[in-house]
Amino acid sequence: MCGVCGELRFDGQAADLGSIARMTAMLERRGPDHGGSYSDGVLAFGHRRLAIIDLSNHSSQPMVDQELDLALVFNGTIYNYPALRRELQQMGYHFYSSGDTEVILKAYHAWGEECVERLHGMFAFAIWSQDQQRLFLARDRMGIKPLYYNDDGRRIRFASNSQALLAAGGVDTSIDPVGLHHQFTLHAVIPAPHTILKGIRKLAPGHCLTIERQGQRRLRRYWHLKSVRPQRERSEAEWLEAIHDALRSAVKTRSEIADVPVGVLLSGGLDSSLLVALLAEAGVSDLRTFSVGFEDHPDEKGSEFEYSDPVAARYSSSHRKFLVPNADVLRRLPEAVDAMAEPMFGQDAVAFYLLGEQVSREVKVVQSGQGADEVFGGYFWYPRMAAEIEGSPLQRFSRHYFDRDHEEYLHTVAAPYRGEDYSSATIAGLLAEPDADSFMDAVLRMDVTTLIVDDPVKRVDNMTMAWGLEARVPFLDHQLVELAAQCPPELKLKGGGKHPLKAMARGLLPDAVIDRPKGYFPMPALKYVRGEFLSFMRDILHSRACLERGLYAPAYVEMLLAAPEMHHTRLLGSKLWHLALLEFWLQRNVDGRASAPV
């Protein structure tokens, strides 16, 4: 796992090595083990390495193969690289390293841009062809690894986070109206290619982009998830067995493909607890588990130790739990916001950030349960959507998901930022894509391929990589996702959701963990805003920077400040926190950078 960046000039000038150095410096926390750079006239790469596979210098990056005239920077892990390596060796390729990085180089030489279809894992990488003067960018199917870029017509820069691009300079930091609408409607999810800033874009999951030296571009979608029933009907027992086998394989692979110990982020919920059980089932003896909790709130408990402790005890894991007081949450909040490549409303971002700090002191790789709810229908709003019989697919979805309808959005932002109902148009288009047998098939597919990417998946990547900690997400193994997408939604939603996982867990986990209501990393202080947290948010929204930016309608801000606990979204988030977080992110990450040199 690493941080990558680069620049390709279209005007014939040499790539700016100063910009590469500034970008690479902003990526150091993603890759604390090694840094390097590479240049070839109009092209330059920068890289920061977190050594997980092949810890020797042979796998350091940028990796250059002079024989093949290729250079590579890569962030991620390729789980099937041993099999690909053997196949490439049989084709006559020779290897000087033992890791997955060199396998990508040879695979690109052997199969061109179609190499991405052969890669099983999480990845974002760039390959420069020296002889063809061509740049190839690719991102994994599920969008687990990020890839941002800035394209001003004279050159394109790319990086693993937006902070690196901002540090390079020359970025248009004005607010993107499409991104802003998505931000406040879709729970801070801004589907690719947009971001909150006009000058920063991101490569969509399951896509690759080829860029010629003169600037010609070719974008290709190489993966499309089909949510249709298989030709041969399967019984419930057959579905459960197939899903169990696929998940067992995904968990085992993510434990074995590493040259360092692998731990588990154990929240106390079904998903992470099941990972522990399956790792034990696979014969992993040195189980290391980690949990975090916060202060209780009068309206909500702040920890889930009562659920995680029995799981750790049942499987005799080496278990560490961390209790964080509210004072530490507020004190460390600016650090977490600085680590966000994009502004995130999820209350558990700070939880992951603080947990990542502790876990990184003991291991470099963890497995995490993100994706299970989206893949197997675990959220409370899915049954409500399924029960809807009135209205269009967009209406059936938006009634239970949108943080704000368009009318409220128009009251949220100031007049210059009011525009079209971009979010409704985007969601309607996604729900109408082909190869979905039913409305709920379309909903679950959209969640897995789009909404999850820029909410929990991005959050886990940003907050763990801020500490040089690699998070692996077996529930988002693309082969498991493809299998689950064929499974009837009724089976997934049975018993309140995640029926295949609950059935699998019987006998492996305590019934109290299986049958408990869906939980999250609890962060009550950011949901029930009172005391110091309310003062903190009021100060942000009354700050000079916020007032001069003029993003929000003053009347809406004052309404939220007057009664913050009266205004929650359909997904139970604080609307006041939404406004404060976005403004705070802009102040921490953007203000002062708009005039940075090109």
Image (spheres, rainbow, N blue to C red):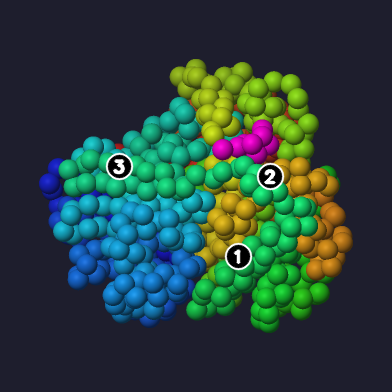
The residue at the point 62 percent across, 67 percent down is 249
In depth, the one of 135 and 416 nearer the eye is 135
Residue 462 in the image: x percent, y percent? Answer: 51, 55
Q: Amino acid at mark 2?
A: Leu
Which of pointers 3 and 2 indicates the residue nearer the eye?
Answer: 3
Find residue 526 and name its label.
2
Q: Secondary structure at mark 3?
A: strand
> Would you say 285 lies left or right of 410 here?
right
Mark 1 vs mark 3, CA separation in Å: 32 Å
Q: Residue furthest left?
A: 12
Residue 326 in the image: x percent, y percent? Answer: 70, 54
- Give the labeled residue for mark 3: 218
Q: Amino acid at mark 3?
A: Arg
Quarter of the figure with residue 111: bottom left
The residue at the point 21 percent across, 41 percent down is 215
Q: Residue furthest right?
A: 511
Q: Is residue 375 above or below residue 69?
A: above
- Give the labeled residue for mark 1: 250
The residue at the point 29 percent across, 74 percent down is 93
User: Which one is earlier in the sequence, the residue at label 1 or at label 3?
Assistant: 3
Quadrant where the C terminus is found in the figure: top left
Quarter of the figure with residue 243: bottom right
Q: Is residue 320 above or below residue 425?
A: below
Q: Amino acid at mark 1?
A: Ala
Quarter of the figure with residue 275: bottom right
Mark 3 vs mark 2, CA separation in Å: 43 Å
